[in-house]
Amino acid sequence: MPTLFALPFPVIDPIAFSLGPVAVRWYALAYIFGLLLAVWYAKRLVRDRSLWPGSEPSTTPAQLDDLLLWCTLGVVLGGRLGYVLFYNPAYFLAHPGEILQMWQGGMSFHGGFLGVVLACLIYGRRKGIGLDQLLDLGAASVPIGLFLGRLANFINGELYGRETDVPWAVLFPIPPDGHLEARHPSQLYEAVLEGILLFLAVRVVTHVWKKLPAPGFASGVFALWYGASRIIVEFVREPDAHIGYLAGGWLTMGMILSLPLIAVGVWLILRSRTFA
């Protein structure tokens, strides 16, 4: 039930602008600018020699421009296939024609993450660049896109949190009839944890601790922080209606998919060459 102190949901048209019959959504712009800004930031990192004490940058700005297309495909295809396989395989098995209808919603961070890892692996092998070196640059820059993506989720009124009476609750319109309920603005929690704070945490790794010459350390911090942050938010985020809660009535699919990220993050940090 709505609370006396719940904040009204800021109704923002999910369509940013239209070009004739083509409607450009905020969600699409979040992906586009997230990728472009991530590459721009990664190029700044490889140009700054002070961040690579005792070594050479792992790649060049030109190579990062080439990598952009690979990562775009990895994010889009991986994110969509991850949603199909992790969150609703039975539905899409019965409706295969809807798998490519990404404008209807349904993207998975964990799937997109695996897609980017695969893209970096293939590109790195073609160019003789280590996977962990490319992932470290991604770890430093990807939080920009995560921040923009979560803001787009909020604008769309999707992925909202569970019902609550906290003073900062937001009255989200709930499908199918659009009635208002006071919910945690979990998209904004994630924008802060997975976007702003994760960016700052990895920036400490790259600019204060100067760990870019230690392959795997930055990406390990990224995976560990993201996995832990996602699990924390899952306690207040509404699970997908067709999945609901799993074992014990509190476990969610997002938690299950984030646990391996934490394990991988710890492993990457421990295997970083600074400990060799």
Image (cartoon, helix red, strand yellow):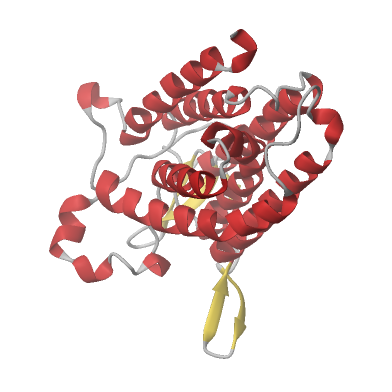
Q: Residue at x 46, y 34 (%)?
A: 164
Left or right, 11 with respect to 77, comes to right
User: In the rendered image, is residue 168 in sight?
Assistant: no
| Residue 56 against residue 43 in the figure, above or below | above
Left or right, 231 with respect to 216, comes to left
Please provide percent x and percent y for residue 234. 42, 31
Quarter-wise, where is residue 219 in the image? top right
Viewer-proximal residue, 190 or 258? 258
Of all residues shown, which one is farthest toward the top? 275
| Residue 43 against residue 48 in the figure, above or below | below
| Residue 205 against residue 110 in the figure, above or below | above
Viewer-proximal residue, 164 or 52? 52
Q: Residue at x 33, y 50 (%)?
A: 83
Left or right, 5 with respect to 268, comes to right
Please provide percent x and percent y for residue 146. 58, 45
Left or right, 254 with respect to 53, comes to left
Quarter-wise, where is residue 68 in the image? bottom right
Please provide percent x and percent y for residue 69. 55, 61
User: In the rendered image, is residue 201 in sight?
Assistant: yes
Q: Quadrant of the C terminus?
A: top right
Q: Quadrant of the N terminus?
A: top left
Please provide percent x and percent y for residue 183. 48, 41
Viewer-proximal residue, 186 or 56? 56
